[in-house]
Image (cartoon, rainbow, N blue to C red):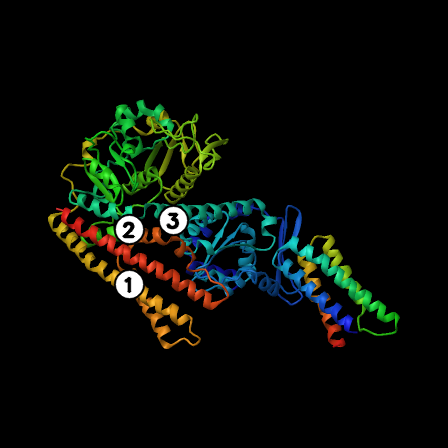
Amino acid sequence: MEDMKIYLQSAITSLELTTKNFYQNHISEGYKQLEDTVVKLDNVICAASAYKQQGLETGINEIQLMEKLQEALKALENKDALLLSDILEYEIKGLLEQNLEMII
Amino acid sequence: MNYYEMNMECIKNNRRSFYSLLLEKNAQELTDINRLENIRCENAKNGEQILIIQYHSVEYRLNSIYRPSDEARRWAEQYSLQNLNNVIAMFGLGNGMFARTLTERMGTSDSLIIYEPCYAIFDYVLHQYDITDIIGNKQVFLAVEGINDDAFHIVLSSVISINNMKSLVQCNYPNYDKIFQESALRFYKELKDSYTSVKINVNTVIYFGEKHIDNTLNNLKFIKNSNTLPGIRENIPKGIPAVVVAAGPSVRDSIDLLKKMKGRAVIFAVDRILDYLLDSGVIPDFIVTIDAKKDIKYFSYKDNITIPLICYYDSNYDILEHHKGKKILCTHNLFAEEIYRRTGKASADLIPSGSVAIVAYSACVKLGFQRIILVGQDLAYIDGQSHAGSFNEEGNKQRDIFVEGIDGNQIKSRADWKEFVLRYQDLVRSNKDIEVIDAKQKGARIIGTTVMSLDEAYEKYCDQTFEPDTLLRDNDAIFSQNDIAIIKDYLASNLVTLKKIREKATVAVKECNKLLKYENMTNKPDAFHKSLQKLSKINKSVNSYTINSLLDSYITAKTADSLSEILLLTDNEHENNVSTFTKSKLIYKAVAEAADYTRTRLEDAINYID
C-alpha cells in the first residue's frame, strides 16, 4: 500500500497547487496545473482498481470519487474556475485525505 | 438599525464629502453606469452570504459557494505586503470580503485604495452587508464610479511618493476586470498615469537638486520690494476675465485679438512667449516664470522688462535678476511659507506644476478670477510645430504620443503635454465654479473646458474695460521695514538650525555604523535598541525644522535610489536591517552635506536682503 500512499499524497499536493492558482485568480496557471492534477487523480483511481482486482481494499470509494469528478467536469465545462476549485478543495481533497489517513 | 442605516451612518461620520455626494447624485443615473440586469444574495454552504449578479445577460457568482471567507483569505495570501508604506490599489469592492482580508494583512503605514465600478453593487451591499469596518477604516479610500471617481486619481497621486513607488500593489476583486472591462481599463490607466506623474515629479526634484537652494536663497534679495498674489488680489477688477497665454503654435493666429483684449482682460503670459508677444505689439499685464534652471533666452533678450513677474522663490535667479520690475513671489515649501507666517501675512503658497501655464492658471484662481481664457494651450503639435516663435522643438519618437484632440480625433502630442492635460483636468474639476475657455481651433482636448474661438470669447466676455495701471502700483510692497527685520531674524535663526541639523546628521551616521556593527553580532546588546531610539529622535527633530523643506531636493537628488528602496523588505530580518542601516547612513550623510551647502549660501543671502 506504500505506492497508494504516494499516489494519494501526490494527488493532494497537485490539487492544492491547482486550487491555490484558481483562488488567487491565476486562471491560466490553474488550468495548466489542473492537467497534472488530473493525471495524479487518474493514478489514484487506477491504483485503487488494481488493488481491488487483487482482492485488497484501499478504502477508496471510486463511485463517490467519480461523482465528484463529474461535478468538477461540469464546472470545467462551464468555465467556472471558482466552483471547480471549490469542488477540488472541499469535496475531492477531503475524500483523498480521508483515504490517506486510513492507509497510514 | 438595519445594515443600510449603519453603513450610511458610518459613511456620514467618516467620509463627509463622499456622504454628501452620495445624497446629491441621481440614483437612476448612477445605476445606468455598468447597468446590471439582476443582483441577489444566496447562502453559501457555510451560511455566509454570497453575491450573484447578472450583467450583459451573463450570471456571475462573485464568491465561493462553499466558504467565501476562506476563498478571500487564500486570494489575499499572494500579496506579501512585507514592505513598509504599501499602497494597494484594488479594482472592485464587491461585498467587501476580499478588501477585508487585505485590511487584516496591512501594516499601520499601508493604504488601500478601492475603486468600485458598479454603483448598483455598492448600493445593494450597503443594504445587505455590514461593511462599517471597511468604511470606518482610515487607511482605506473608497471610490465609486459616478460618485467620486474624480478623487481616485488625486488620492493615488497623493499617497504615492519616492519612498513607496516600488511598493505599489495592484489587485482585482476576482473576475471584476473581466466583467467590467471598460472600467478596468480606465482603472489601469489611472494607476499608470498617477505613477508616471509621481515619477516625473521625483525626476524633476532630482534634476533641480542644488538649484532649488541656490535660487531660493539668492532670490531673498528681492523680498524687500516684492508682493504676493493675496497682496494684489484686491486690485483685480471684478467681472473681467483672465487670459493665460501659453507658447503653443496657435498664439500666432491670436495676436490681433490679444491686442484688442488689452484693458479688457488681464493678460498673463508665460515666460517663453514673452518676447514673441512684445515683438508683436502685445503687452501682457503679468509674466509667469517657474523653472529653476530655465535659460534667459526662454525669458527675454530685452533688458528693460518691468512687467510684474509672478514667480516662485526657487525660480531661476538669473531671470529674476534680469527682470527689472516688481516680483510677485509665491511659495511651495515650508521654509519660504514661514516668512509670511512670521510677518502675519496671508499665505503666498501656489500649487506647483511642471507647466508654467498651469501655474499661471492657478495664479488666476488665487486672484479670484471667475473666468479664465486659455490661449496657445495647444498641448499638441500643430502643423508639425511645437511652439510659437523661434523656439520650435523637434519631434522625438521616444516621447511623442497621441491624445484626443478637440475634434475627437487623435492628435500627435508629447508625454509631458499629456501629463499637463491630465493636470489641467484635475484643476478644472477642483474649481467647478470657474469657467475655463480653451480658445483654440486645434490641439489636445482638456475635459471640463469650453472650446471656442478667441474671437467668440472676446465678443462674449470682453465687454468691460479697466485701467491696467491699477493692477499694481510701483510702491506696492507687502513687507514693511519692521517685517524685513523679522525676516532677517528668522533667516539668522536658520543658520543655527542648520548647524544643529548637521550635528544631528553626523551623530546619526555614527549611530548607523554602530547598528551595522551590532547587527553582525550573534546577540544584540542593549545599545542596539538605544541607537534605534536615538535615530528616531534625530529624525523627528530634523523633520520638525521648516528649513528641512529646502534641503529636501538636494537630499533627494543625492540619494534617490536609497530613498526609493528604504521601505522595501524581504523575509530575512538581518538583510532588511543591514539594507536599512546602510541606506540610512547615505541619507544622513546627504542631510549633513545639504546643511553645509545651505548654510554658506544663507549667510551671504542675509547680507543682501537690505
Q: CA distance from mark 2 to mark 3?
A: 15 Å
What residue appears at the point 37 percent right and 77 percent down from the top-left corner? B526
Label 3 secondary element: helix
Q: Which residue is mark 3?
A: B202
Q: Which residue is mark 1?
A: B506
Please, is residue B48 above or below residue B40 in the view?
below
Taking B466 as reference, is B69 left or right? right
Q: CA distance from mark 2 to mark 1?
A: 25 Å
Name the residue furthest left.
B481
The x, y position of residue B522, in whole percent, is 44, 75
What residue appears at the point 43 percent right and 49 percent down from the top-left corner? B151
The x, y position of residue B575, in whole percent, is 46, 65
Between residue B210 and residue B183, name the one nearer to us: B210
Q: Are marks 3 and 1 on the same chain?
A: yes
Label 1 secondary element: helix
User: The disc labelled 3 sits on which kind of residue?
Assistant: Val
Q: Which residue is mark 2?
A: B333
